[in-house]
């Protein structure tokens, strides 16, 4: 009797009739490549044009957003949502198509070094045109208590880097700046170029006029008793400040100076816990990066979508 043998699926021929290699696409590889670099999963599947198209689609929301679309939290949230949905679609598309390519014959660009070259090109592109320079906004993390109560530690904030292209910072605006101590810091503008500043250890006087302060209550922060005031700056801008209720250990040092031209006097709202212009000096206008706009994250849901232009 003639015996019949069947070839197991795992041992199917890997060559076509004309001798070309057959290398089925692996969905998990498409997933990882798409996750690392959008469009690379499609290129792995032999869809070069589609991969480049999907990559280009990711830049469309960024281009739209560059027109002040994300200078408010709602625009920022929509941008993030659209980008996430696009990325998710690209990943799912690469996986689904990979599952159909059981008899895939690799193209010339289906090799690891071409994939690496593509990924390196994308990384280089983002290095040359980083998103924050395209959008003219930047995200910062608040790491200290110096700006309480307007900003809390772990707040994620967005700054408009174009705010001062056509004008100078004004009283009350929260700004991000390059600190002489290193890194990017955030404080509030309380003195403009040429202003005569007199800080008596608790309250501020600008150009011989004492800023009006109104006590609004007391609170305990991290075990320390604090008094909260509303301070009114020379242009009428009102904001909240905190002072330690008790012996400050000599930390409330008085300051008197005239702000140099093209410089600004910056202070933290948490007056007894801020390494601000009282200690690091006025900040030159060239070091001010932009104005803080809003929060988009924090250590609790209440810290989301706080308008910092009104704090």
Image (spheres, helix red, strand yellow):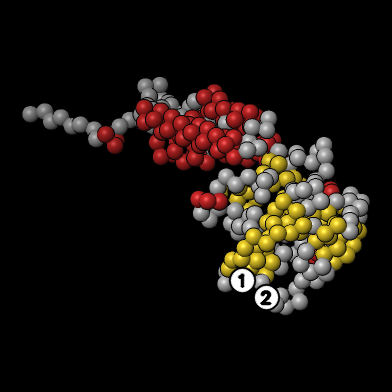
Looking at the rendered structure, which numbered label has been put on residue 246? 2
> Going by the image, does 252 lie left or right of 50?
right
> Going by the image, does 168 lie left or right of 11?
right
Q: Residue at x 46, y 41 (%)?
A: 32
x, y percentage for residue 171?
79, 49
Nearer to me, 281 or 25: 281
x, y percentage for residue 286?
84, 48
x, y percentage for residue 204?
80, 61
Image quadrant for the N terminus? top left
Question: Can residue 50 be seen by looking at this rendering?
Answer: yes
Q: Secondary structure at mark 1?
A: strand
x, y percentage for residue 261?
92, 51
- Where 254 sits versus 103, above or below? below
Q: Residue at x 86, y 57 (%)?
A: 209
Q: Residue at x 36, y 31 (%)?
A: 99
* Residue linked to disc 1: 225
Nearer to me, 91 or 32: 91
């Amino acid at each position: 009797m003639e015996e019949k043998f069947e070839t197991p699926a795992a041992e199917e021929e890997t060559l076509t009739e004309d001798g070309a290699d057959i290398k089925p696409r692996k969905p998990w590889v498409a997933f990882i490549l798409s996750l690392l670099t959008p469009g690379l999963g499609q290129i792995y599947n032999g869809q070069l044009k589609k991969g480049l198209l999907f990559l280009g689609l990711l830049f469309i929301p960024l281009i739209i957003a560059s027109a002040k679309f994300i200078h408010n939290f709602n625009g920022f949230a929509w941008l993030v949502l659209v980008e996430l949905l696009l990325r998710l679609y690209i990943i799912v598309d690469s996986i689904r198509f990979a599952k159909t390519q059981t008899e895939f014959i690799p193209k010339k660009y289906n090799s690891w070094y071409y994939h690496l070259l593509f990924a390196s090109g994308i990384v280089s592109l983002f290095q040359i045109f980083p998103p924050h320079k395209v959008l003219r906004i930047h995200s910062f993390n608040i790491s200290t208590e110096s700006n309480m109560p307007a900003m809390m530690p772990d707040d994620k904030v967005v700054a408009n880097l174009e705010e001062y292209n056509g004008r100078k910072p004004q009283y009350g605006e929260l700004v991000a700046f390059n600190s002489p101590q290193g890194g990017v810091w955030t404080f509030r503008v309380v003195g403009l170029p040429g202003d005569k500043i007199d800080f008596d250890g608790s309250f501020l006087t600008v150009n011989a006029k004492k800023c009006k302060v109104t006590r609004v209550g007391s609170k305990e922060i991290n075990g320390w008793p604090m008094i909260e005031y509303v301070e009114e700056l020379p242009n009428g801008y009102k904001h909240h400040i905190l002072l330690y209720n008790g012996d400050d250990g000599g930390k409330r040092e008085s300051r008197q100076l005239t702000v140099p031209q093209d410089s600004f006097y910056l202070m933290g709202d948490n007056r007894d816990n801020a390494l601000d212009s009282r200690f690091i000096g006025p900040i030159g206008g060239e070091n001010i990066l932009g104005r803080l706009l809003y929060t988009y994250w924090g250590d609790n849901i209440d810290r989301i979508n706080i308008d910092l232009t009104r704090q």
